[in-house]
Amino acid sequence: MTGIVWYLTIFVLAAFVGFEVISKVPSILHTPLMSGSNAIHGIVLVGALVIMGEANGTAQLVLGFIAVFLATLNVVGGFVVTDRMLQMFRAKPDQRSAPLQGGGGHGAVAPATGAARSDAARSDAARSDGAVPVEKPAGM
């Protein structure tokens, strides 16, 4: 086989194998696996830089530049996805458990001792500004 036909054959076979492997991954594991593959994207970027360094002629330089650009987008996108995934697991501060401090004329009624109150006591707490405390549904 000639060089270009051989390379296209390998590319098409790799695309089929990649599709089959990725389609078997459950959606719950897709994001962690993608974040773990950032190292592979980094290797692709290094490979694109090496190939661009050996380019001869304008066409090869342009294709090398496109390869470096797309590989860079892939690496940056992987880090963005990883950051968004990790934000889902960060604990949000629970504002209800913090003791309310009086001040500013709002007349907060929670004790400043920091003692924990039950959910029923928290929901029954009267506020002088007339606002009704809103409880989060269970599981959030």
Image (spheres, rainbow, N blue to C red):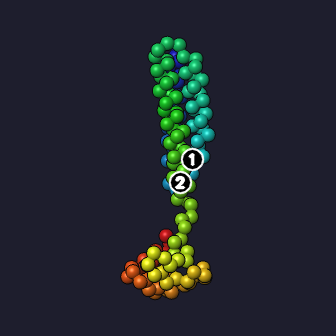
Position of residue 7 measured from the top left corner of the image (x, y, whole percent): 52, 24
Task: Identify the secondary structure beneath mark 1.
Answer: helix
Whether residue 95 appears in this view of the structure is yes
Q: Measured along the vertical axis of the image, is residue 10 above or below residue 59?
A: below
Q: Which is more N-terminal, label 1 or label 2? A: 1
Badge 1 crowding class, 10 Å Cα cut-off, few under 14, some 14 to 19, many 20 or more, is some
Residue lying farthest front? 104
Q: Secondary structure at mark 2?
A: helix
Looking at the rendered structure, the kind of residue marked 2 is: Met
> Disc 1 marks which residue?
35
Q: Camera-side residue: 115 or 76?
A: 115
Label 1 is placed on what type of residue? Ser
Report the Cα–Cα distance between label 2 and label 1: 9 Å
Please tell me whether residue 73 is drawn above or below residue 24 in the rendered image.
above
**Mark 2 vs 1: CB contact within 8 A:** yes
| Residue position for label 2 | 85
Q: Along the line of sight, which residue is nearer the eye, 105 or 87?
A: 105
Residue at the (49%, 24%) spot, across then down: 65
Q: Residue at x 57, y 32 (%)?
A: 44
Q: Residue 68's x, y, as percent? A: 52, 28
- Identified at 54% across, 16% down, the residue is 55
